[in-house]
Image: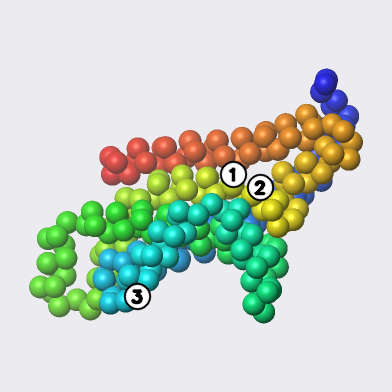
């Protein structure tokens, strides 16, 4: 099947609209949720709060061990049977955000554990409140070390938004497949999706590598 430029230009606005309205927005909101919730998980696991730490650890392990499509199915299709109905886009944000929060939590925990023991001892000797220790000493250093790793997970999340086809979210790839099915031409819509992903992901990947190199020499 030959490339049809006229057809490609005709469908480009619809695919771009799906990318901006759904793929990009869902990725941004899910990233924000993952960053905040992942930090909460990491702190809970690090400070070892009785019962809560065990529950959080079990939840993190369970979430990481189950695939995103299964989580989408349970949240979107089964929860309404128990009286909890969540919209498709909201479900996508929640599932992706919580799923990646469990990965973010492990990265955060690694960054926290990399803080030299001497700094914890110095904070204790200065009688700093725990809130100040975490906010001014621990977290700034931990986040600085793990920022490149978090960026890689964000890029991975961005490329997994097409899983939302399982709950009928009209994100970019879903729209492209619909266009391909309606016109019996898949080359142009799917190629456009690939180009958009490349143009969005590659600069971010290069920026993450440069940031990692810069932080290593900072």
- Residue under the image location 75 percent in, 50 percent down: 18
Mark 3: few/some/many CA within 10 Å (<14, 14-19, 20+) = few
Q: Is disc 1 in contact with disc 2, using a CB cutoff of under 8 Å?
A: yes
Mark 1–mark 2 Cα distance, whole angstroms, equals: 7 Å
Q: Position of residue 205 (x, y in %)?
A: 49, 38
- Mark nearest the camera among 2 and 3 is 3
Mark 2: few/some/many CA within 10 Å (<14, 14-19, 20+) = some
* Mark 3, secondary structure of its residue: helix
Q: Quadrant of the N terminus?
A: top right
Q: Is disc 2 in contact with disc 3, using a CB cutoff of under 8 Å?
A: no
Q: Quadrant of residue 169?
A: bottom right
User: Does residue 89 show up?
Assistant: yes
Q: Which residue is mark 2?
A: 162
- Residue under the image location 33 percent in, 70 percent down: 54
Residue 159, disc: 1
> On screen, 2 above or below 203?
above
Q: Is disc 3 in contact with disc 1, using a CB cutoff of under 8 Å?
A: no
Residue 52, disc: 3
């Amino acid at each position: 099947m030959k490339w049809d430029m006229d057809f490609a230009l005709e469908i480009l606005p619809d695919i771009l609209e799906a990318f901006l309205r759904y793929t990009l927005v869902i990725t941004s909101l899910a990233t924000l949720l993952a960053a905040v919730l992942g930090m909460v998980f990491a702190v809970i696991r690090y400070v070892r709060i009785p019962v809560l730490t065990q529950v959080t650890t079990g939840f993190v392990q369970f979430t990481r061990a189950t695939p995103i499509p299964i989580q989408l199915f349970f949240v979107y299709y089964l929860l309404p049977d128990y009286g909890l109905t969540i919209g498709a886009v909201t479900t996508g944000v929640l599932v992706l955000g919580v799923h990646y929060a469990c990965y973010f939590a492990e990265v955060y925990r690694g960054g926290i554990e990399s803080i030299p023991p001497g700094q914890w001892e110095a904070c204790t000797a200065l009688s700093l409140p725990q809130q100040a220790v975490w906010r001014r000493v621990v977290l700034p250093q931990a986040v600085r070390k793990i920022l490149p790793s978090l960026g890689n997970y964000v890029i991975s999340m961005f490329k997994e938004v097409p899983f939302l086809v399982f709950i009928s979210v009209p994100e970019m790839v879903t729209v492209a497949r619909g266009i391909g099915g309606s016109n019996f031409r898949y080359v142009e819509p799917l190629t456009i999706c690939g180009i958009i992903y490349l143009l969005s992901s590659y600069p971010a990947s290069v920026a993450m590598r440069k940031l990692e190199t810069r932080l290593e020499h900072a």
